[in-house]
Structures are given as structure tokens and as C-alpha cells.
Amino acid sequence: MFFTLSKIIGFFLKAYNLIFFSILIYILLSKSRFTFLRGLSYFFGFFALFVIIIGGFNYIPNYLIWKFENFIEIQKPVNPDGIILLGGSFTGSKKALDENQVGLGGKAERVVEALRLLNDNKEAKLLFVADASMLVNSDLLSEAEQAKKFFEIFKINPERLIIKKLANNTYQESIEIAEYLREKWW
């Protein structure tokens, strides 16, 4: 139920959908004979106009994103024992793997940063909890296989890699990582 509700609310929070439905409500209610409904239509009309104006100026959203990104100071690890890499970085392209390459997706900065940290910290190990959904459909290429290939291409010692097929999403990944760390290190 929560998942469905979050998808519905998320749909209406996207700017284009919000503007479209605000304009639609404005058009439908502006011809009403009830003053309250006409007033409500004006609210939605002004709201759509406000979102268009604020969203239309690039410097306002860019400033808000910059402010949000710089709200928390970056803390660089000093001699970490391990590196945790979350899934979602690979595309699942079999063609790329056949050509001795790995397809990276929109969250590729995770893998690149993990590779940099592995190269900077020669004793650190990498813990990667990959997608368990690939266990169901064997036609798809799992992130675990792609991660192994990626780090093999960059000559990272396989003994430094701990790659598990246990999770489908970030929540499951965090639980599996916590359980693994509890078993092995504490």
C-alpha cells in the first residue's frame, strides 16, 4: 500500500504533471457558478504560473540544488578498512560484456569513486551487495558479474572483492550489508 501511495504522490510532485493538472483544474473550475470553486481555480492557475516562472529560471533551481548538495560537508575517509558499494551502477548489457567492456548507467559515479578509493587504499576491501532479481531471470546479466568484470578490467585483486547476490533495492542492500558486517567484523 505504501509503495502504491508513494508512486501516486510522486507522480503529482513532478513539475510537469503538477503544472498540467493545475492548469486542468483551473480550466475546469474557472467556469463554475460557485464563487468558492472559481476562487479555487484561480489558486490553481496562479500556482501553475508560479511553478512555471520559478522552474523556468535556471539559476533558481541550480542554486537550490547547489545549496542542498553543499549543506553537508564532504568527509573523505582516511585509511578505510572497507568500501561499501551500492548497486544500480551497471546497465546489464550483454553486448558490452562480450566485447570485454561493462555498461555503466546513470549512477556510475559510485563505481568510479569506489575504484578510486580501492586504488588509493591498497588494503581496503570492497563489499558489493548486488541484485538478487537476476537469480529469477537468467536471461539478464547480473550486476555481480558486471562488477567482477569491471574490477578485473582495472586489475583489482579479486581477493579484495566481496560481491554478494542478495538484494533488489537500497533498503534490502543496507540490511544485507549490516548483517554481513555484523557476522564478519563484529
Image: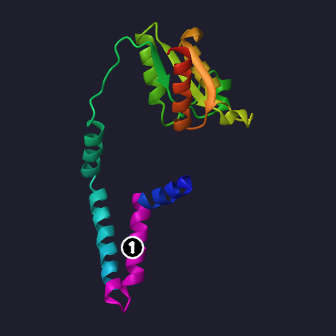
> For residue 54: magenta?
no
- Range of residues picked out in magenta: 14-37
124, above or below 172, in the image: above
The residue sitting at 40% across, 11% down in the picture is: 120
Which image quadrant for residue 172?
Answer: top right
The residue sitting at 48% across, 31% down in the picture is: 108
Residue 104 in sight from this viewpoint: no
Magenta span: chief secondary structure: helix
The residue sitting at 51% across, 29% down in the picture is: 86
Tell me the quarter of the image containing the N terminus: bottom right
**Residue 102 percent coordinates (x, y):** 59, 26
**Residue 11 percent coordinates (x, y):** 48, 59
Residue 183 in sight from this viewpoint: yes
Q: Is residue 62 left or right of residue 133?
A: left
Q: Is residue 135 left or right of residue 84?
A: right
Judge by depth and name the residue closer to the eye, 139 or 182. Answer: 182
Q: For the residue marked with disc 1, what is the amino acid?
A: Ile
Judge by depth and name the residue closer to the eye, 105 or 179. Answer: 179
Which image quadrant for residue 180?
Answer: top right
Determine the secondary structure under disc 1: helix
Judge by depth and name the residue closer to the eye, 175 or 154. Answer: 175
The residue tagged 1 is: 23
> For residue 33: magenta?
yes
In this view, the residue farthest toward the front is 186
In this view, the residue farthest toward the bottom is 33
